[in-house]
Image: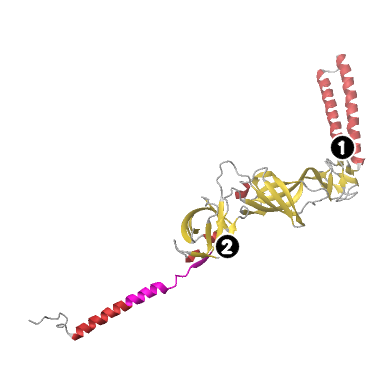
Amino acid sequence: MIPTDPHRSEPRQSRTRRHLLTATLLSLAGCAANAKETAPPPSLTTVQTTTLGTATNTTRISATGTLGAKEEVSLSFKIGGVIQSITVNPGDHVRAGQTLAQLSQAEIGNEVAKARLGRDKAERDLARVKALHADSVATLEQLQDATTAFDVAQANVRIAEFNQRYAAITAPADGIILERLVERNQLVTPGAPIVKLRTMRDGLVLRVGLADRDAGRVRIGDAATVTFDAMPDRTFTGTVSQVGLGAAARTGTFDVEIALRNIPQGVTLPSGLIGQAMITPRVANGTAARQTIPIEALVEATGDTATIFTVAPGAIAKRQTVVVTALEGEHVVLRDALPAGTQIITAGAAFVVDGSKVRIDSARSATSDRAPATRVGGARP
């Protein structure tokens, strides 16, 4: 019996097709291996980052206001009359007790004389009635009436002498004349302002207006720095000395005064200068640390929840959810502070996915060691 070759019985066309398929699969496997060895790695997304500093409790408040003395008073006469003399001009330095202006004494002097004459007459009448009452000639009622008339006459003298004292204006303290509002021989009414005096016994203050959200954070004693456009090379220090408890009807802002400290000798700050204040509120015990990040770091947000990307070791992008509590200019405040040194992606985050490798553009990345966030307040009118 002749052995049978298993391939011999297979048709030649079928064998040829099988050999071609095998060769094709081997060729494709070789190509795949070569492709695996030579294909370039996928391109990396270039991003910019910000490295966070330590969380802070403080957000500074910026506000604009006007400078003035704590005590700036408009001085006036209690009574009306004709001005006899006014001896000061704007810019004059005056001493406490110095006479600044005086009314003509022609009228008030006669009023004092009239009151004194009335008192003298009432005193004589009372003496006569007392003598008559002792002789049982005058009644008790007549004695009481005479006593009352004398008391009234004495009160009239005190009133006239009081008005006479305030027919002259004297400086209540050392200071500088800011305004002179009248001239000699001018007729003035009671209470009309005559001169405006700036005293220095309580120092200088910058008066600013703050919105309610900022006024509620400011307390007496908070530190501040003040600059003036008129003196761009100088920075003055101060503290909050007064915080208004009611909003101004016209602006809705709360009046805050910043007392300037340690003004150098020889430096004169005129009233009315426009100043810019930077207030650093103190933080009450137990207040949580506050951290801000650039608003461009937010990829998406729903309500107070937002998504950001941080960069993990190995330049791996990690998706992270944060809770935003406030918007402050170009930054947002996080409820839970991220660790210092955390890198957050601020540009290019929209093109990365969680776990992808990124390339950091070091030249355009930054460190968030900035000063505490600044909130801008309004100017006091």
Residue at the spot 49% in from the left edge and 67% down from the top edge: 45
Is residue 199 rendered magenta in the image?
Answer: no
Numbered mark located on residue 139 in the image: none
Where does residue 46 sit, x and y in percent of width and height? 52, 67
What span is colored magenta in the figure? Answer: 28-47
Residue at the spot 86% in from the left edge and 14% down from the top edge: 134
Q: Which quadrant is the N terminus positioned in?
A: bottom left
- Front-lying residue, 41 or 126: 41
Relative to 314, is 38 above or below?
A: below
Residue 29 visible here: yes
Gap between marks 1 and 2 measured at Cα? 73 Å
Where does residue 95 sit, x and y in percent of width and height? 87, 42
Mark 1 neighbour class, 10 Å CA radius: few under 14, some 14 to 19, many 20 or more = some
Answer with the quarter of the image where residue 328 lies: bottom right
Where does residue 83 sit, x and y in percent of width and height? 89, 46
Which residue, given by chain and number where applicable, does mark 2 sit on?
365
